[in-house]
Image (spheres, rainbow, N blue to C red):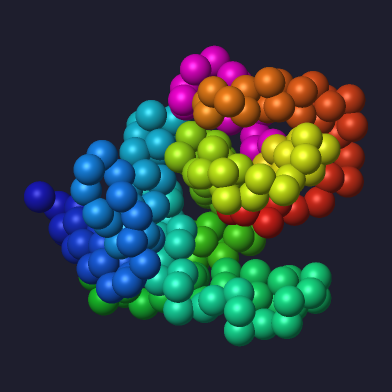
Amino acid sequence: MSQQTEAFEKAIALIDAANTEDTNTETADGKTWPKELLYSHRMSAILQRYTPEADEAQRLAIHAQHIQRWKSPRSDYPMDRQGYHQWRTNLYKFHAETAGALLAQAGCGEDIIERVKQAVGKRALKVNRDTQLLEDVAALTFIEHYMLDFAARHPEYDESKWIDIIRKTWKKMSDRAHQFALAGGIKLPEPLVPLIQKAVSESENHPHDLGESDLL
């Protein structure tokens, strides 16, 4: 086993250990998981299907996407748009610094650490290939695993609200991720397929100024 691979395996174990501390739980396939531990494993599984050739930095960034997210709750900030953006900015910084520290502890090289911090910190979306890959996988994971549950928790959302949410998610994905999703690469939430199809069609007709998704 190479030194780099040893560091990679140790980094994955450290990320998992950190996310195991999450007291929020979710049940999947009859097993109760710490919420962010389950999320990281789902992200890595989607990555394996979407980009099996991903290198170690990309695989680490995907696994660390929501590292200890519960430690920076939305409720710590004003419940308005400005407070939301402050939370997101600080959250990305927290994720990047937390992931970087764990990777350094694992013995990862500076180049890998910096790439992971750039991606997890959501820097240079649409330009940085690592960041775009992370956004693609996050969107695909949300659609397959979380969109239907989110819909169940928000029955007050009408069709126009859901189309807006889907369009904003779609906007952040690359063309390759679009094709992967529509070609059966992920399991679409069946009750929402008509809305997804409608939102995708509208995105193609209104490609500009869709804003950010609040969900990823």
Where is residue 94? Give x, y as percent. 51, 76
Residue 75 seen in this snapshot? yes
Q: Residue furthest left?
A: 1
**Quadrant assignment, res 93:** bottom right
Quick one: 131 or 30, which is closer to the camera? 30
Where is residue 27? Give x, y as percent. 31, 50
**Quadrant assignment, res 169:** top right
Q: Determine the residue positioned at 62% across, 23% down.
A: 193
Name the side, left or right, on which 80 lies relative to 26.
Answer: right
Q: Is residue 177 magenta?
A: yes
Name the side, left or right, on which 201 lies relative to 104.
Answer: right
Quick one: 13 or 130, which is closer to the camera? 13
Up-down relation of residue 166 to residue 138 (above or below): above
Up-down relation of residue 18 to residue 52 (above or below): below
Q: Determine the residue positioned at 77% across, 23% down.
A: 198
Where is residue 34? Give x, y as percent. 30, 62
Q: Residue furthest top?
A: 183
Where is residue 163? Give x, y as percent. 77, 36
Q: Determine the residue positioned at 86% across, 34% down.
A: 207
Q: Is residue 92 magenta?
A: no
Q: Determine the residue positioned at 88% across, 46% down.
A: 209
Name the side, left or right, on which 65 lies relative to 37.
Answer: right
> In the rendered picture of this protein, how many numbered marks are placed on residues?
0
Question: In this picture, which residue range is highlighted in magenta?
Answer: 170-187
Up-down relation of residue 144 to residue 34 (above or below): above
Residue 126 seen in this snapshot? no
Up-down relation of residue 135 to residue 123 (above or below): above
